[in-house]
Image (cartoon, helix red, strand yellow):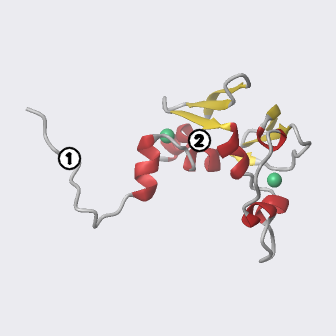
Amino acid sequence: MSYTSAREYLSPTRIHADRPNRTLEIEWADGHVTRYDFTTLRWLCPCAYCRGEAGMPGWLDSAPTLTDAQTTLTDLQLVGSYAVAPTWADGHHTGYYTFARLREECPCPEDTARRTADPHAGHAHQGRLG
Ligand SMILES: [Zn+2]
Ligand SMILES: [Zn+2]
């Protein structure tokens, strides 16, 4: 992968929080579209409180039952050109979600398959057409 395509890969061209449908949609420069539902997004919160730090478990590690407020996105701030910081209805706003992470954790079938790809699964996907 060249540096140019790596940069495109991690450059959102459009970020849209759809509050009625509770989804965050990100379109990338390479044409890929990533769509998170708010609950999934909250579970990915990378802040020290949620994730823990210095070897200490975070709040999300205790597998809490998230309330509606905790999974309702009320605002989204851009952080420089590398991340977004959502504000949740419970007031939580300390998670900086880098574009790299948002792309890496993309929940689409294609990326889910990529993350769970097992070279020993014995399932060949390169069947030829025609
Ligand atoms: Zn957090
Ligand atoms: Zn994807």
Residue 31 or residue 71, whichever sits in front = 71
Query: Which numbered marker is on residue 85?
Result: none
Mark 2 residue type: Leu
Q: Earlier in the sequence, mark 1 or mark 2?
A: 2
Asked whether, in this view, residue 55 is left or right of residue 35, the answer is right
Percent coordinates x, y for residue 15 in the rendering: 67, 28
Residue displayed at 72% across by 61% down: 63
Percent coordinates x, y for residue 118 in the rendering: 35, 63
Q: Is residue 123 above or below residue 68?
A: below
- Name the residue tied to disc 2: 10
Disc 2 crowd, CA 10 A, few/some/many (<14, 14-19, 20+): many
Query: Which numbered marker is on residue 126?
Result: 1
Residue displayed at 48% across by 40% down: 108
Residue displayed at 81% across by 70% down: 53
Foreground: disc 1 or disc 2:
1
Asked whether mark 2 lies closer than 8 Å to ligand 2, one says: no
| Element on which disc 1 rests | loop
Percent coordinates x, y for residue 59 in the rendering: 81, 62
Mark 1 residue type: Gln
Q: Is residue 70 above or below residue 78?
A: below
Residue 121 or residue 94, whichever sits in front = 121
Residue 29 or residue 14, whichever sits in front = 14
Disc 1 crowd, CA 10 A, few/some/many (<14, 14-19, 20+): few
Q: Is residue 75 above or below residue 48?
A: above
| Element on which disc 2 rests | loop
Q: Outermost residue toward the right?
A: 91
Percent coordinates x, y for residue 60 in the rendering: 75, 60
Residue 19 or residue 25, whichever sits in front = 19
Asked whether, in this view, residue 9 is left or right of residue 77, the answer is left
Q: Outermost residue toward the bottom?
A: 55
Badges 1 and 2: C-beta atoms under 8 Å apart? no
Q: Outermost residue toward the left?
A: 130
